[in-house]
């Protein structure tokens, strides 16, 4: 039996190729204060890390989803999750809850940030689902990840608000 092909997490580093054009575009638009470049750089590195953790490694094998059934990969029951997995997903999105409101002050509202976190997390889960259906990569698609990631973003916002109490100061931090 042949071993499956593996696409390793080093491929996530390919996203770093997009970094210089992002900074160049910021400079052209006059939004390249030192603080903002640092915040964007940290967000970019964070995003590459999340991609490396959630999408890679991709083990390419025959897509056997029809034989295995949906229950092997889809987890749709909320709060039925190993505690460590839930905590790690919370921790993974804490930087999201700090960085997004710093870069986009309009996201400094609980419901707005929660919406952004749900969308980002759903994007991750959708990517994992597509990788499963198309390439046979058995990554779990779990509703608990959506819950934990959103909670992590809100914890990050709480930490940011504790560290910098006023919205005006938070808005100026990465301006």
Image (spheres, rainbow, N blue to C red):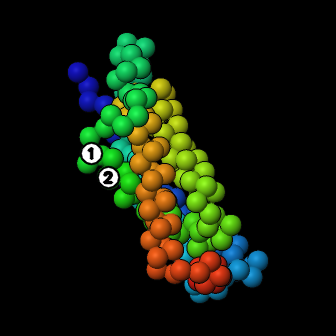
Residue 120 percent across, percent down from the top left: 55, 50
What residue did someone put label 1 on?
83
What residue did someone put label 2 on?
87
Q: Residue at x 26, y 30 (%)?
A: 3
Q: Residue at x 44, y 62 (%)?
A: 155
Q: Report whether 13 appears left or right of 168.
A: left
Q: Residue at x 36, y 37 (%)?
A: 79
Q: Residue at x 50, y 66 (%)?
A: 157
The residues bearing labels 2 and 1 have C-alpha atoms spaced at a distance of 6 Å
Residue 68 percent across, percent down from the top left: 35, 16
Quadrant where the N terminus sits is top left
From this view, report whether residue 74 is shown above or below residue 98. Answer: above
Picture quadrant where residue 31 is located: bottom right
Circle 2 crowding by C-alpha within 10 Å: few under 14, some 14–19, many from 20: some
From this view, report whether residue 159 is shown above or below residue 9. Answer: below
Q: Nearer the viewer, residue 168 or 23?
A: 168
Q: Secondary structure at mark 1?
A: helix
Q: Secondary structure at mark 2?
A: helix
Residue 40 percent across, percent down from the top left: 57, 72
- Residue 40 visible in image: yes
From this view, report whether residue 56 is shown above or below residue 36. Answer: above
Circle 1 crowding by C-alpha within 10 Å: few under 14, some 14–19, many from 20: few
Discs 2, 1 touching: Cβ within 8 Å: yes
Residue 175 percent across, percent down from the top left: 65, 82
Q: Nearer the viewer, residue 103 or 115?
A: 115
């Amino acid at each position: 039996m042949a071993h499956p092909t593996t696409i390793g997490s080093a491929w996530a580093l390919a996203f770093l190729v997009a970094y210089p054009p992002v900074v160049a575009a910021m400079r052209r638009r006059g939004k390249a204060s030192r603080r903002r470049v640092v915040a964007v750089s940290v967000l970019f590195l964070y995003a590459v890390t999340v991609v490396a953790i959630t999408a890679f490694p991709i083990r390419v094998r025959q897509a056997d989803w029809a034989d295995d059934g949906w229950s092997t990969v889809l987890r749709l029951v909320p709060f039925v999750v190993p505690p460590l997995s839930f905590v790690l997903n919370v921790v993974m999105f804490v930087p999201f809850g700090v960085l997004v409101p710093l870069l986009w002050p309009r996201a400094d509202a609980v419901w707005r940030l929660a919406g952004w976190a749900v969308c980002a997390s759903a994007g991750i889960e959708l990517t994992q689902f597509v990788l499963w259906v198309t390439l046979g990569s058995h990554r779990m698609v779990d509703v608990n990840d959506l819950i934990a990631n959103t909670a992590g973003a809100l914890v990050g916002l709480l930490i940011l608000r504790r560290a910098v109490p006023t919205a005006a100061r938070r808005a100026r931090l990465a301006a």
